Image: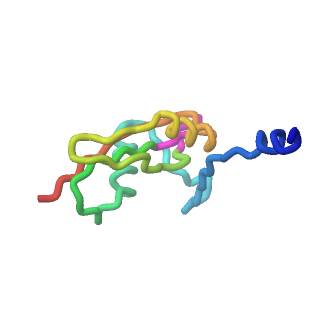
């Protein structure tokens, strides 16, 4: 019985963050101003989505403000989306990010 209880203490889920770079680390884009973040978002956003929804993304930065990665956190309805801060911070911590830029996108197709 004690062995079973001790073994169950070590069975925990781990958050997996995958990083699939399309370029070398020295070629990472740098965010020096808000327009840089906007351009990164616009160039990496899926333009083919045809729906009425609000999307929440985070952009992860290292200490030099180079982009580590970008991920979609949630998709909501027309009026808003819910974001779990634990998920945002878990991804930031697992990717060793020093900075987080968060943004929402609303796309309305009529």
Q: At which x and y percent is residue 99?
A: 52, 34
Relative side of 33 to 12, left or right: left
**34 falls in the magenta region:** no
Q: Is residue 9 above or below residue 39?
A: above
Res. 95 image quadrant = top right
- Residue occupying the far bottom of the picture: 48
Residue depicted at x 62% and y 53%: 25
Relative side of 55 to 65, left or right: left
Q: Which residues are magenta?
A: 59-66
Q: Is residue 47 above or below residue 106?
A: below
Q: At which x and y percent is residue 63?
A: 59, 34
The residue nearer to you, when weighing 10 against 41, is 10
Q: At which x and y percent is residue 44?
A: 39, 57
- Residue occupying the far left of the picture: 110
Relative side of 103 to 84, left or right: left
**63 falls in the magenta region:** yes
- Tell me how many marks there are: 0
Residue depicted at x 45% and y 41%: 31
Q: Classify the position of the N terminus by image quarter.
A: top right
The residue nearer to you, when weighing 11 against 82, is 11
Q: At which x and y percent is residue 84?
A: 45, 37
The residue nearer to you, when weighing 46 against 11, is 11
Residue depicted at x 21% and y 54%: 52
Q: How is the image coloured?
A: rainbow
Q: Classify the position of the C terminus by image quarter.
A: bottom left
- Residue occupying the far front of the picture: 1
Task: Label the magenta part by its dominant secondary structure.
Answer: loop
Residue depicted at x 18% and y 53%: 108
């Amino acid at each position: 019985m004690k062995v079973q209880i001790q073994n169950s203490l070590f069975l925990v889920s781990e958050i997996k963050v995958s990083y699939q770079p399309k370029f070398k680390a020295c070629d990472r884009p740098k965010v020096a101003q808000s327009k840089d973040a906007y351009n990164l978002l616009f160039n990496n956003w899926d333009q083919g989505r045809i729906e009425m929804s609000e999307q929440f993304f985070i952009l992860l930065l290292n200490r030099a403000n180079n982009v580590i990665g970008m991920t979609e956190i949630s998709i909501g309805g027309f009026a808003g989306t819910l974001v779990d801060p634990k998920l945002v911070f878990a991804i930031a911590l697992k990717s060793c990010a020093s900075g987080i830029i968060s943004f929402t996108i609303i796309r309305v197709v009529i």
